[in-house]
């Protein structure tokens, strides 16, 4: 069942099976998301309890309470620097030395209960990396991965000079796995600019900087090349499955590198390191969120504290997850789709007449084989107020439902 469409269970596992979907997806067996203290990890992996602290609280896309947000001025907004990645103006050592001063360590601290005494206290739940990209109005803004700060009651930032500061979460988006936090500007002496990731080509040299395996190895520098651009990777996040557009690189990305910078030959951030493959026998397959994808999300998080997407208002389960007894009325030629398991009574779906056990097979004429297909179409092609035509099967008969999508920061 898709977590994006249903109330979260008491405890969720960060490792979920992902469907194979062409190209590289036919090679990947499992995709892991939402792992604090690690790059998101792809591969057949079973983690210890060290990684099992993530406990989503509800079906809201916004996983943390944003600060009171103000619309960013032109100075506050993140921007893309127009340079050619083919031009290498500085040595790798020079780039690493300058960039490392803007790379931070991030510690996720959560309030946990002692199972023996019943007492509550703060405990470090994992760590990751981040990049200082802007200083304004007394604050320094840092981009990182959502899974690095998800569920935190306190976020602590470690600077290159050893200083530590408590961060405030500006906003976070689980689907794109991006988050923005801020600290007092006095702690930040350096910032990094975003390069144009659309100019990257396979073979371009890049370096990754982050904190593999924790802060003891902070600001570790690894070198590699861009192995491929525009990869589509399906990941299972804390709010459901999503397909990320990523840069593939062979620069070493290890647990703790999440949220760190992938840097081009001009010293600019062209990617936010997020995923890797750990399947046995696999080496040099890391992935980063392209800067051109990240910057609009970053700016919206600064402006509003969240990402607003069209909201349908249903819980869904794909047909392969449904016991056969509930599918007996479906025509034999209906082999895929997603079933409505719950309808929010105050939602657009309820107003349009969607009912529990309706099987959605298309939206605006586009096939819906899985719940992720519906989500991807809505988020990529529609906005609040748009009308969607859903083809559903109800008690074995095809029915057309027209729904006007509402606005909600929750995933729908």
Image (cartoon, grey):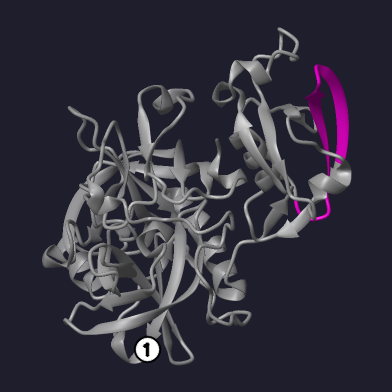
395 left or right of 215?
Answer: right
| Residue 131 visible here | yes
Q: Is residue 396 magenta?
A: yes
Q: Is residue 250 magenta?
A: no
Query: Vertical placement of 232 versus 143: above or below?
Result: above
Q: Residue at x 36, y 76 (%)?
A: 154
Query: Vertical placement of 71 versus 198: above or below?
Result: below
Residue 133 place in picture, x, y as percent: 40, 73
| Residue 196 visible here | no
Of the pair 282 and 58, the residue shown nearer to us:
58
Residue 48 place in picture, x, y as percent: 22, 45
Q: Residue at x 16, y 81 (%)?
A: 162
Secondary structure at numbered mark 1: helix
* Picture quadrant of residue 188: bottom left
Q: Residue furthest left?
A: 216
Total tally of numbered discs in the picture: 1
410 left or right of 40?
Answer: right
Q: Which residues are magenta?
A: 383-402
Residue 303 place in picture, x, y as percent: 60, 74
* Picture quadrant of residue 259: bottom left
State the quadrant of the N terminus. Answer: top right
81 left or right of 375?
Answer: left
> Which residue in the protein does label 1 denote?
185
| Callout 1 crowding tier (Cα within 10 Å): few <14, some 14–19, many ≥20 | some
Of the pair 248 and 47, the residue shown nearer to us:
47
Residue 378 place in picture, x, y as percent: 70, 44
Q: Residue at x 45, y 51 (%)?
A: 10
Q: Residue furthest front?
A: 117
Q: Residue furthest top?
A: 332
Query: Vertical placement of 179 versus 317: above or below?
Result: below
Give the dominant element type of the magenta stretch: helix, strand or loop: strand
């Amino acid at each position: 069942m898709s977590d994006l469409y249903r109330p979260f269970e008491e405890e969720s596992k960060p490792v979920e099976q992902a469907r194979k979907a062409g190209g590289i997806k036919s090679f990947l067996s499992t995709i892991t998301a939402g792992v604090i203290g690690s790059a998101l990890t792809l591969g057949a992996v079973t983690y210890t309890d060290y990684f099992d602290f993530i406990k989503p609280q509800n079906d809201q896309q916004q996983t943390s309470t944003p600060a009171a947000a103000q619309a960013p001025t032109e100075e506050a907004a993140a921007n893309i620097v127009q340079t050619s990645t083919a031009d290498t103006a500085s040595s790798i050592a020079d780039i690493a030395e300058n960039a490392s001063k803007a790379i931070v360590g991030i510690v996720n601290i959560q309030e946990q209960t002692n199972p023996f005494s019943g007492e509550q206290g703060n405990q470090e739940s994992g760590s990751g990396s981040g990049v200082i990209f802007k200083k304004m109005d007394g604050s320094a803004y840092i981009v990182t991965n959502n899974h690095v700060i998800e569920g935190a009651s306190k976020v602590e930032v470690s600077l290159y000079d050893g200083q530590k500061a408590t961060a405030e979460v500006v906003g976070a988006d689980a689907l794109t796995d991006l988050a923005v936090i801020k600290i007092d500007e006095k702690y930040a002496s350096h910032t990094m600019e975003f390069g144009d990731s659309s100019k990257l080509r396979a073979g371009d040299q890049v370096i990754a900087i982050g904190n593999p395996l924790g802060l003891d190895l902070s600001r570790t520098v690894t070198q590699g090349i861009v192995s491929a651009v525009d990869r589509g990777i399906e990941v299972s996040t804390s709010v459901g499955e999503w397909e990320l557009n990523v840069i593939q690189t062979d620069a070493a990305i290890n647990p703790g590198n999440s949220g760190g910078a992938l840097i081009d030959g001009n010293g600019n951030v062209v990617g936010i390191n997020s995923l890797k493959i750990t399947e046995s026998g696999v080496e040099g397959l890391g992935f980063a969120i392209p800067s051109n994808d990240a910057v609009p999300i970053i700016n919206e998080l600064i402006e509003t504290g969240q990402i607003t997407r069209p909201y349908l208002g249903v819980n869904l389960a794909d047909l392969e997850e449904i016991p056969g007894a509930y599918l007996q009325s479906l025509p034999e030629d209906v082999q895929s789709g997603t079933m409505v398991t719950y309808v929010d009574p105050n939602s657009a779906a309820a107003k349009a007449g969607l009912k529990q056990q309706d099987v959605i097979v298309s939206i605006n004429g586009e096939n819906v084989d899985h719940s992720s297909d519906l989500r991807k179409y809505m988020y990529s092609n529609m906005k609040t107020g748009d009308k969607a035509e859903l083809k559903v099967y109800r008690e074995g008969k095809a029915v057309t439902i027209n729904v006007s999508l509402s606005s909600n920061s929750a995933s729908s």
